[in-house]
Amino acid sequence: LTKPDHIFKMKPLYTFRGKVIRGKGRGKVYDMPTANIDAGSCGDLPELGVYASLTTVENDRFISVTNIGYRPSVDDEDRVTIETHILDFDKEIYGQEITLELYHFLRATRQFDSLHEVKDQINQDLVRTKELFSDFIV
C-alpha cells in the first residue's frame, strides 16, 4: 500500500501493537492466513467483531481485515482472539511486533453452518474492505 498524504487524515477507531503468535493454522489451510496477536496483551479491546483495518509490518502498511472475538464456527474455545488477514502479504512474521489500526466496523461475529459459508463471508469482508480503502490503493 502506497501511503498518500490524505490517508493520515483518517483517524482509526482503535490502534494497538502486539507480537504475532502462532494460531492453529486453519487460515493457511483455506488460503487465508492470519497474523494472530495475544488479546491479553492488548489492554481494553473495542467492540467484538470484524473490522476493515490497516496493519503495519516493518514500517510497511497493508490493508487488512481483522477479527476480534470468538470463533464459534471453527472452535468452541471461550477466549477472545485477535486475528488479521493481511491482503497481498505472504511473509512469515511470527514473533514480530505489528500495529493494527481499526478503521471501520464491518459486522458482528456470528455462527456459520459450514466452513464454506465462513470463507464466503470472509471474501465479502475483503471486498468491502478494499472498497472502503479504494481511494488509498495506488
Image (tube, grey):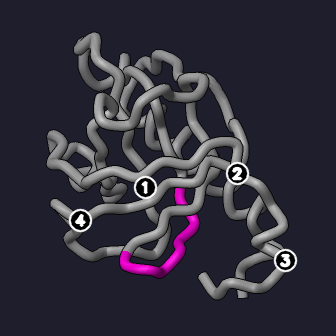
**Which amino acid, by three-letter code, is at mark 3?**
His
Report the span colored magenta. Answer: 58-64
Residue 69, x across and y down, in percent:
43, 24
Residue 39 lies, with reference to residue 90, above or below; the image says above
Q: Is tag 3's residue or tag 4's residue first in the polypeptide sequence?
A: 3
Residue in front for this viewpoint, 137 or 3: 3
Q: Is residue 43 left or right of residue 28?
A: right
Query: Which residue is at a point 69% across and 63% down the rendered structure image?
Result: 130
| Residue 31 lies in quadrant | bottom left
Where residue 85 is drawn, which disc sits there? 1
Q: Which residue is mark 4?
A: 96
Residue 92 lies, with reference to residue 55, above or below; the image says below
Q: Is residue 133 left or right of residue 50?
A: right
Q: Quadrant of the C terminus?
A: bottom right
Give how far apart the Cα atoms at labels 4 and 1 are: 15 Å
Give how far apart the Cα atoms at labels 3 and 2 are: 13 Å
Q: Which residue is mark 2?
A: 12
Residue 6 lies, with reference to residue 2, above or below; the image says above
Residue 82, x across and y down, in percent:
38, 37
Residue in front for this viewpoint, 39 or 132: 39
Q: Is tag 4's residue or tag 2's residue first in the polypeptide sequence?
A: 2
| Residue 32 lies in quadrant | bottom left
Q: Residues within 10 Å of mark 3 (few under 14, many from 20)?
A: few
**Which amino acid, by three-letter code, is at mark 4?**
Gln
Query: Which residue is at a point 38% across and 36% down the rendered structure image?
Result: 42
